Image (cartoon, rainbow, N blue to C red):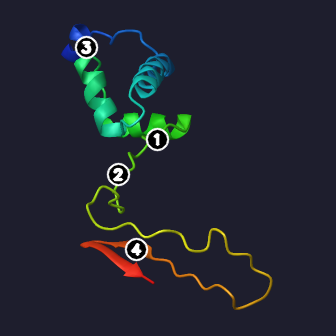
């Protein structure tokens, strides 16, 4: 026989279509993303691997982009007002004031601007 040895030993791969595998991965990604909305593609890849699916992070990212799934960032809450103190609380003097013209009442406000090292204040 004049056929290569590799032909004799060739075993075809399992007959799973690529589209079928992608839909399975997409279903699993959607399931994980619903349960953990803050997960990004890295955490979802790790969760898929824990479930026993062999999947690449690039494939997970591509499928997530196609499906329009993104991890929601958690907003960090920073308390900027400390109302629980022992200092004197001043009354609102303008509560009973009736305004009927311009330049009768002036007001000031403080705005907190976040920078890398903390806050700065704009008055």
Report the mark closest to the observer, 3 or 1: 1
Q: Residues within 10 Å of mark 2 (few under 14, many from 20)?
A: few
* Label 2 element class: loop
Q: In which quarter of the view is residue 101 placed? A: bottom right
Q: Which mark is residue 39?
A: none
Res. 1 in view? no
**For this rendering, which residue is in front, 112 or 76?**
112
Left or right for 23, reference 79: right
Residue identified by numbered label 2: 76
The answer to whether the residue labelled 2 contacts the one labelled 1, judged by CB atoms less than 8 Å apart, is: no
- Mark 2–mark 1 distance (CA, rounded to whole Å): 18 Å
CA gap, disc 4 and disc 3: 79 Å
The alpha-carbon separation of the residues under discs 3 and 1 comes to 55 Å
Instruction: Kindly identify which numbered label has been placed on residue 70.
Output: 1
**For the point 33% across and 31% down, which residue is it?**
44
Which callout, 2 or 3, points at the residue further toward the start of the chain?
3
Mark 4 Cα shell of 10 Å, populated few (<14), some (14-19), many (≥20)? few
Viewer-closest of 98 and 47: 98
Which residue is label 4 attached to? 113
Q: Residue at x 43, y 28 (%)?
A: 33
Q: Nearer the viewer, mark 2 or mark 3?
A: 2
Q: Is residue 25 left or right of residue 78?
A: right
Residue shown at 41%/9% (left/top)?
15
How far across and how far down the image is residue 2, in percent?
A: 25, 13
**Contact check, label 1 and label 4, Cβ < 8 Å:** no
Position of residue 70 measured from the top left corner of the image (x, y, whole percent):
46, 41
Residue where numbered disc 3 is placed? 2
Alpha carbon distance from label 1 to label 4: 28 Å
Q: How far apart are the alpha carbons under marks 2 and 3?
A: 71 Å
Of labels 1 and 4, the one closer to you: 4
Residue sitting at 50 percent across and 21 percent down?
A: 19
């Amino acid at each position: 026989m004049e056929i290569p040895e590799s032909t004799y030993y060739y075993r075809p791969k399992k007959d799973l279509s690529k589209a079928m595998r992608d839909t399975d991965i997409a279903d699993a990604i959607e399931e994980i993303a619903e349960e953990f909305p803050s997960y990004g593609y890295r955490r979802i890849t790790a969760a898929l691997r824990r479930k026993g699916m062999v999947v690449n992070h690039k494939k997970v990212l591509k499928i997530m982009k196609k499906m329009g799934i993104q991890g929601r960032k958690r907003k960090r809450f920073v308390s900027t007002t400390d109302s629980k103190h022992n200092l004197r609380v001043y009354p609102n003097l303008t509560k009973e004031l009736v305004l009927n013209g311009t330049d009768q009442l002036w007001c000031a406000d403080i705005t907190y601007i976040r920078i890398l090292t903390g806050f700065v204040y704009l008055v």
